[in-house]
Image (cartoon, rainbow, N blue to C red):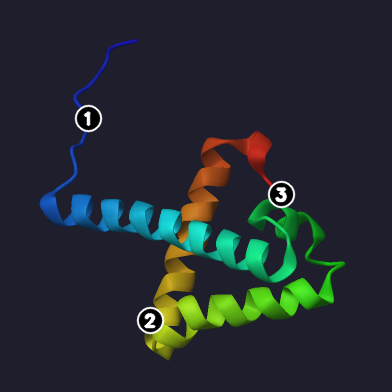
Amino acid sequence: MAVTEPRWLTEQEDKAWRGLMAMEDSLTAFIDRRLRTGCGLSHADYQVLAQLIAAAARQHVADARDAVIDQLTATELKTLATITDKVRRRLAALDPAARP
């Protein structure tokens, strides 16, 4: 199979991609710290137990709202949902074994 030259990111695409990665790292670390401090759970613990643990759910939604949701306009939230849905669909197509 011939290796083709990659489609390198433009400056704007690279800035957006690096921003997304940095935001995800910061958000995950923030949520993990808040859950550990407030509920004694890691973010991974919360993801597994979210359907069972009402106290942690209250803390988690408050933190998600404070860190992200309340910082965005309705238009920005719609755009974010569109972007994340699109990326998740692509990830599922690239790795069918990882589909929920």
User: Which is nearer the eye, 39 or 87?
Assistant: 39
Q: Is residue 77 visible?
A: yes
Rendered location of residue 53, percent (x, y) = 84, 69
Q: Which mark is residue 51?
A: none
Q: Is residue 68 visible?
A: no
Question: Quadrant location of the N terminus?
Answer: top left
Location of residue 97 (image quadrant): top right
Badge 1 vs badge 3, beta-carbon distance below 8 Å: no
Q: CA distance from mark 2 to mark 3?
A: 26 Å
User: Which is nearer the eye, 36 or 80?
Assistant: 36
Q: CA distance from mark 1 to mark 3?
A: 30 Å
- Ranked by sequence position, the earlier of labels 1 and 3 is 1
Which residue lies under the disc numbered 2?
76
Q: CA distance from mark 1 to mark 2?
A: 31 Å
Badge 1 vs badge 2, beta-carbon distance below 8 Å: no
Mark 3 Cα-neighbour bin, 10 Å: few <14, some 14–19, many ≥20? few
- Ranked by sequence position, the earlier of labels 2 and 3 is 2
Say which residue appears at 59% left-offset and 59% top-offset: 32
Helix, strand or loop at label 2? It is: helix
As shown in the figure, which amino acid type bears the numbered disc 1? Answer: Pro
As shown in the figure, which amino acid type bears the numbered disc 2? Answer: Glu
Which residue lies under the disc numbered 1?
6
User: In the drawing, does residue 85 fall left or right of residue 9?
Assistant: right
Q: Is residue 47 above or below residue 81?
A: above
